[in-house]
Amino acid sequence: MSNWEATKLVTGRELKVKIRDKTFLISTGFLLVFAILGTVVPSLIGGGSASVAVVAGTPTEQLTAAGLEVREVADAAEAERLVRDGDVDSAVVGGVVLALDDEPSDVVSALSDAPEVRLLDPGKVNPGLAFLVPYLFAMVFFFTSLMFGLQIAQSVTEEKQTRIVEILVSSVPPRVLLAGKVLAGALLAFGQIGLLALVAIAGMRFSGSEGENGVSLLNLLAPAIAWFLPFFVVGFVLLAAMWAVTGALVSRQEDINSASSPVQVVIMLPFFGTIFLSDNPLAMTIMSYVPFSAPIAMPVRLFTGDAAGWEPFVSLAVLVLAAAAMLVVAARLYEGSLLRTNGKTSLGAAWRSSEKLPV
């Protein structure tokens, strides 16, 4: 059996185990419910389109075009009565807008003639989006890397603790086990994010919240999202290899937290760096070429328009080289520590022990 065939077997085994895991299923269900609530509930609470009463014969094209529910009445007295009774949200009588206790901004906006707007800096991103988009990219990469990476480490340590790893190593090389775990973790992470995105899009379509502004936002985000995907894939592989080594260095589940501190720092620094330094062009440029922060920083710079067309290619190439180097180093450390069950193994001891183990 070739190494690739063995890797597929290990990957399949890991996928079957994780898909049946209650923690994974509960977390996935929670995220899906959160996505549904975030997209559907606001529209349900909003109660649909606002209703406005107008006297018969009054032009209603502007109100209808604004998505308002127009109700024609016989005279002004009836329109006022409907507003007081709460049957309609507002009324338009003789050019005057009637409302009970709050100005209906949607009606006023529909009836107003908007002046011509000329943008002096059309490439400038809305300040709200300039904060929200980096936060979202950072959140997705941070929590996915942390959650699935920790599961990889726990899986490795559990196999060591139960001595199952000794049986596995007798059948397949340790490097194949490492490759299978990293690949399975990557597939699960991407699958969960993809499912979450599909549910969110379906929820927006169901709630009717993907209007003109939503389409514009998606068009604005499309290049950044398209680049975020390959950066996410390569960046996750790099971190997953580190998590697998972390699990191999310890012999008890209780020791994972202390052993994983360096990996957690590597994940947390880019997260907070992107959020707090997103408005600092120099800092974001530097983070775009640092392998651990590039998966977040470069897509953000593409969204804000601060990155040149050639930059994502160079940044991704640097990240690929860093991930490949990390896999080589991780494979040796993984081999040297996987069968050591006498407490925590140091990196130096794992590096030296790898030369004495069969490949």
Image (cartoon, helix red, strand yellow):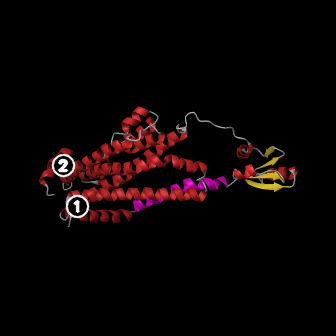
In the figure, is residue 286 to the left or right of 59? Answer: left
Which of the 4 image quarters holds residue 184?
bottom left
Q: Position of residue 18 (x, y in %)?
A: 36, 62
In the figure, is residue 79 to the left or right of 222? Answer: right
Question: Along the polypeptide, which appears first: circle 1 or circle 2?
Answer: 1
Tag 2: residue type?
A: Ala
Q: Position of residue 308 (x, y in %)?
A: 41, 39
**Predominant SS along the magenta part:** helix
Q: Mark 1 sits on what residue? A: 165
Instruction: Say which residue appears at 38% left-offset and 41% top-offset.
Output: 310
**Closest to the observer: 40 or 59?**
59
C-alpha distance separating marks 1 and 2:
16 Å
Looking at the image, the residue that sits furthest to the left is: 356
Magenta residues (range): 22-47
Visible residue check, residue 148: yes
Q: Mark 2 sits on what residue? A: 350
